[in-house]
Amino acid sequence: MSFITDPVAFLANWLQGLLAGWGLSAEWLNFLMLLIGAVVLALLALFWTIFLIWVERKGIGRFQERPGPNRVGPFGLFQPFADMLKIFTKELITPKGVDWVPYNLAPVLIVASTIMIWAVLPFNSTTSGTNISIGILFVVAIGSLGEMGVIFGGWGSNNKYALLGSFRVLAQLISYEVPMVLVLLIPVMLSGSMALNEVVNSQHIWNIVLAPVAGLIYFICLMAENSRAPFDLAEADSEIVAGVNIEYSGLKFGFFYVGDFLHAFTMALLFATVFLGGWRGPYAEQYPILGFVYYFLKTWVVYFVNLWMRFSLPRFRIDQMMAFNWKILTPMALVILMTTALLDKLLPAGQPILRVGGFLVLNVILLVGISLLLSKLLSRRPRPVVAPTPRPVARR
Amino acid sequence: MATEILIWLIPLPPLVAFFLIALFANRWRGLSHYLALSGAGLSWLGSMVVFFTAISREELSKNPIISSINWLPTADTWLKLGVQVDPLTVVTLFFVAWTVLMIFIYSVGYHNYGQPLGDHDHPGLPPHGAHLKDEHGHEHRVPSVEPMYSRFFGFVALFAFGMFTLVLTDNLLALYVGWEIMGLCSYLLIGFWFGKDSARKAAVKAFLTTRIGDMFMLIGLVSLYKITGSLSYSQIFSEASLQLLTSNASPIMGLSWAGFIGLMLFIGTVGKSAQFPLHVWLPDAMEGPTPVSAMIHAATMVSAGVYLVIRFFPIISAGWVPGEALTTTMTVMAFIGAFTALFAATIALAQNDIKRVLAYSTISQLGYMVAALGVGAYGAAAFHLVTHAFFKALLFLGSGSVIHGMEHGVLHTGEEIDPQDMYNMGGLRNKMPFTFWTFLIGGLALAGFPLVTAGFWSKDEILTGSFSGGFMAVFITLALAALLTAFYTMRQITLTFLGQPRTHSAEHAHESKWTMTLPLVILSVFAVSVGWAGIPKAFPVLGGLIPPWFEEFVGSMIESGHGEEVISHSLVPLATSLVVSLGGLTLGWLVYSKVKSGQPDPLQKALGKIYSVLKNKYYFDELYQFLIIKPAFWLATSFTSEWLDRSIIDGILHSFGRFGLWVGRGLRNWFDIPVVNKTGDSLAEGTRGLGSVLRVIQTGRVQQYMVIAIAILVLFGTIFFLFSSGLL
Amino acid sequence: MNSIPMSWYLVFSIGLFCIGLFGVLARKNAVAIIMGLELMLNAVNVNLLAFWSYLYADGMSGLVFVTIVFAVAAAESAVGLALIISAYRRRNTVIAEDMNVLKG
Amino acid sequence: MTPMQIVFLLVASVTLASAVMVVSTRRMFHAALWLILTLLGVAILFALLESRFFTIVQVVVYVGAIAILVLFAVMLTRHVMSEDQPQLNRSWWIASLATIGLFTGMVLVMRTWPIFTTTQRAVGPGGEDLQKLGFAFVDPSGFMIPFEIVSVLLLAALIGAVFIAAERKGGKG
């Protein structure tokens, strides 16, 4: 194991050796390593966000045929840093009549709920924060903490717009959790474990190939989960001025800001992990550093699609959002779950070709059928005129 | 093995069709008749397969195809249910399958499938026709579809099931079952248009009359079971049981058991196929739709009667050696048959209703068969059964087609005339060519037109049989009947088709749909060709060109082949049949070709009083009315109802009632009110009082209840704990 | 390395249970009553898991019971809160004492 | 005093304290917050009991679903009772007596139980075996029937809750 092939593990071992050399007890050593790992990971995530912000602003600029940030530094690379400085130096205004604890707890929860997800992600074959046997469940649970943050913010900042925004977000999150959890069961079935490492390891064939429809649903749910366009009813500036984070200023607002971007990227990571085979790729086993490369390439693809959607699509109306979830996504998710379970039992595990073919056929059938159904449901046809037909005379 | 299973399966499709129609399909006409047709078609297919496999295996009569299962456990043995295919079954199955299928197809057209619903048709009445506007706007009346279309097909399907069962079964019991099923169906179908009073009466009449016969048949059946201890043919007709039957004497007028049972079964036949004393129901049965008439009087029911006696010929003729004196039963059969033949023929002379003529001709033809059996011409009877089934079905369907055409004319012109009266017809041969030619073929076959038609051969057989058997009386009667038959057949044909139209309706009549003509054509083919299967060897010129397959095949049923011992084929019967048929035909032509509209029947002048006697069918209905029905009514009303029921039985019952009333009042006054009610009321009062006391603690506050509950829990918990740990 | 006696868990669960019970018995607000119920159910879960983890870890019954309690808790809170909300809609109160229509 | 014991005592005391706050605080929303804290504490206790699955499930079900339901209920029924009037009903002292009695009684009863203070675990450090649990749920000879019944119960509760809480169209139904 050299630094080139697997830098993280190398460093970890070196550090461990060093600390052990200082004569620490095993427990403390373990604890310390975990602590360091957590700190490093959190910092990495936070700093990564800065880059994300730049990418996003640049991207949206290009999409809208503006140059985007281009003043500070090359290609405006340092623009986010400038914004950071501005946010740091702003005054922290606390409105009157806020509920103090929830008001201040909300931003922390928002960011924490995102970063905690990173703790279970397998970054490559050797590197992962911790590999708990119920990673996927953990992710869902942490999502609920994020909801907590939103509701605290909405309630705490004693503002009806904020409350409305939080209600909206909450309704959206809870609703979209249902199909998300349902389709998350499919990778769990296919890999037979809830630990993310297992999920990744078992993807000799990417789950997206085996269950494209599930992947689609999961992607949509992710977009809804981090409430951005077209699901950005939460901070619908035109209706409820910026929603939850209306009463926040300065660094607290920055937290919300960071949480938003980081959440988007984390969701891309999750999707890449669960459906795109995570760090898997040629030679990723021998040279774990390649794992990072593959992982982040896949993530970027997903993330870019996400941005693309955000830039291009208009905002849903709230009833549309709800209807879309409860009338389309959830039934779809149920059907795909059942059928995939059946097919997974039917198809022998031995032949990948057969499995892929079978699942492909299944998904195509489902997709076509559902789209036909939708086109029938959603098409507005005028109500047919019902004329009373004359009753036949001599007929008992 | 496969054949057995197939035989088992033959009767089923119509039954299934019946249930499907009755339960599910009775709202959809097309579906129901497709069901019925497919049922009949399947049975037909099976029957054909069985037919060809059966005739292709030799010595069929010695070892018939039999398979049977245990059905009903009796005391120590089983009533077996099974199928048996021997030559008789085979030929019967053949014509039954064909005619049934044809009649089914025909019914589709006859009930105007595809025509609009009638303007004021009602279930239970024949369709009155519907007004239809064509594209030019002026409306005209067209036939309307039968209101109870599906019901009809359900019934005929059941009917077909009954017949197939009766033919295919291997024991008398199942035969009786099929027999009764057909009785029921004939009741239902004759009364199909139960809106008409006449139809209702006819249905009841047919049912009761046949029922008389069935009772006797049941007696015979039971006594047969009593003697032989079995009902399956193979055991009944075994040498042993025949011996048993002939040797023992029955208590009734010195007959042997065989004779007695034969007589009983024969009376059953008399009822079923309308022989002399019980013939009255058959003409009235014409009230039903024509396919039903064809079904009952050609294909199935009456044939069933004859089939029965043919089937039981061994018992009937037990103890009879060919060429010697007949047994009592056979004598009875011979005379009743011959008499019926003549008698019915004479009545047929004077009928104007086209269907009634055919009905009486049926009776007389059946008389032929019975007579033939009576004189022991076994094969001839079977042969005539087959040929008659074909040409009589043809004739009935043809008459139905004629009536249909006439109805069309009536609807078109709006005349108020009876479309079935032959005097309203005439000159239809141009209007409805198919019907005419086929009807002509049928008629000639009935009249026994020499050499070509099937009827000739079979009748000739019978005449030969009776002649060579030396029963001159029978022979002459039958010959006379044959003459009359030819005569009235010609009369019918002439009045209906030849000459000039006598009404506007007749002018506007026109040919029926293919669904009705196709069966006619097919049946007419059979009406001609079947005869060739039975040309006797000894027949001059033609004899031996075609081997007399039928005689050998069916005749082989009777050991030593009854009836076929006449090798020297005398020419007398042949000449007779030639003469009578041709003579009758020409006579009929001469008499009736000139009849104009409105002018009475030529015979009326010729015969005078006798004519009216004939026209009123020898006043038989009136006779029965006077002799049987009136006394029965008197007994029922004045004796049973008035005296026995009302006065005596009701009196007793009423006294019981009064007694009960008295007891009840007593109980009420002295027990119920003082004791029971008081107790109940006091209980109720107590409960209410208690409730009004307890309601105070019911505050409606959940928490309070819980507090109390927990407090009590803690209290008792501590007490129990202290006790258990011995601290208290 | 584990040295926590089972009694701690059990006492803890009894305490939690009694606190919840007090909440159920003494609070006016119906929502608060439901919170108390949740506390009681949690206490039960702790109890079950404690017994499972100390005595019956080889069998599955403890875990199954915990799961069932979870489900029941979810159902109970959903229905209960729905009831409270509809009562609030109709009678405009969530005070348990005021909901005494069943008074005898 | 091993670290584990320290952790346990810490968590337990915090949990119990917040539970007391749940039943005693005047502002319903804060009561809900305290409830969440309590639930998290219980979750940690589950973790201490080596049951990781139920730790997470506790977070998902209680914090993620039930607590949010409660919060909703609190928010939807605001301002029905002013927050300075007493939150306890008149018979609260009976209630407190009864509960205290129950507590002492049960503790006393438990004290008499021999293995009350056992310290050795039956469960290994690996925590529960999820596979066995899953099989137990779908095993006809195991807990299939209760499992199905519970699922039906959940469905019924779902539908019932929706039906009860749904706004009747056309005024008050």
Image (cartoon, helix red, strand yellow):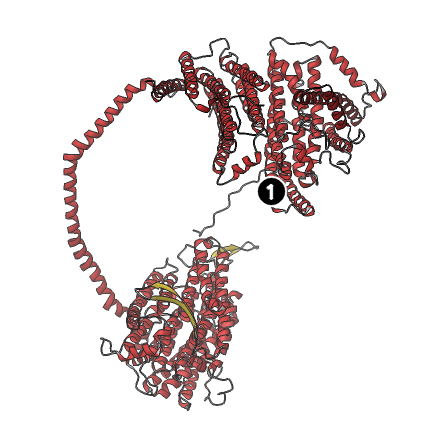
Q: Does B539 appear above or below D142? A: below
Q: Does A176 appear above or below D74? A: below
Q: Can residue A133 be seen in this view?
A: yes
Q: What residue type is labelled 1?
A: Thr
**Along the horizontal axis of the image, is A74 left or right of B657?**
right
Name the residue nearer the viewer: A148 or B250.
A148
Residue B271: percent from left, percent from top? 32, 70
**Along the horizontal axis of the image, is B722 left or right of B251?**
right
Quadrant of the snapshot with the N terminus of chain A: top right
Q: Name the residue under label 1.
A: A339
Residue D88: percent from left, percent from top? 45, 12
In the structure shown, which secondary structural element does the residue marked by tag 1 occupy? Answer: helix
Q: Which residue is drawn at 45% across and 59% down?
A: B16
**Along the horizontal axis of the image, is B525 left or right of B155?**
right
- Name the image quarter holding residue B602: bottom left
Name the residue nearer the viewer: A152 or B679.
A152
- Badge 1 density bin: few <14, some 14–19, many ≥20, Cα 10 Å: some
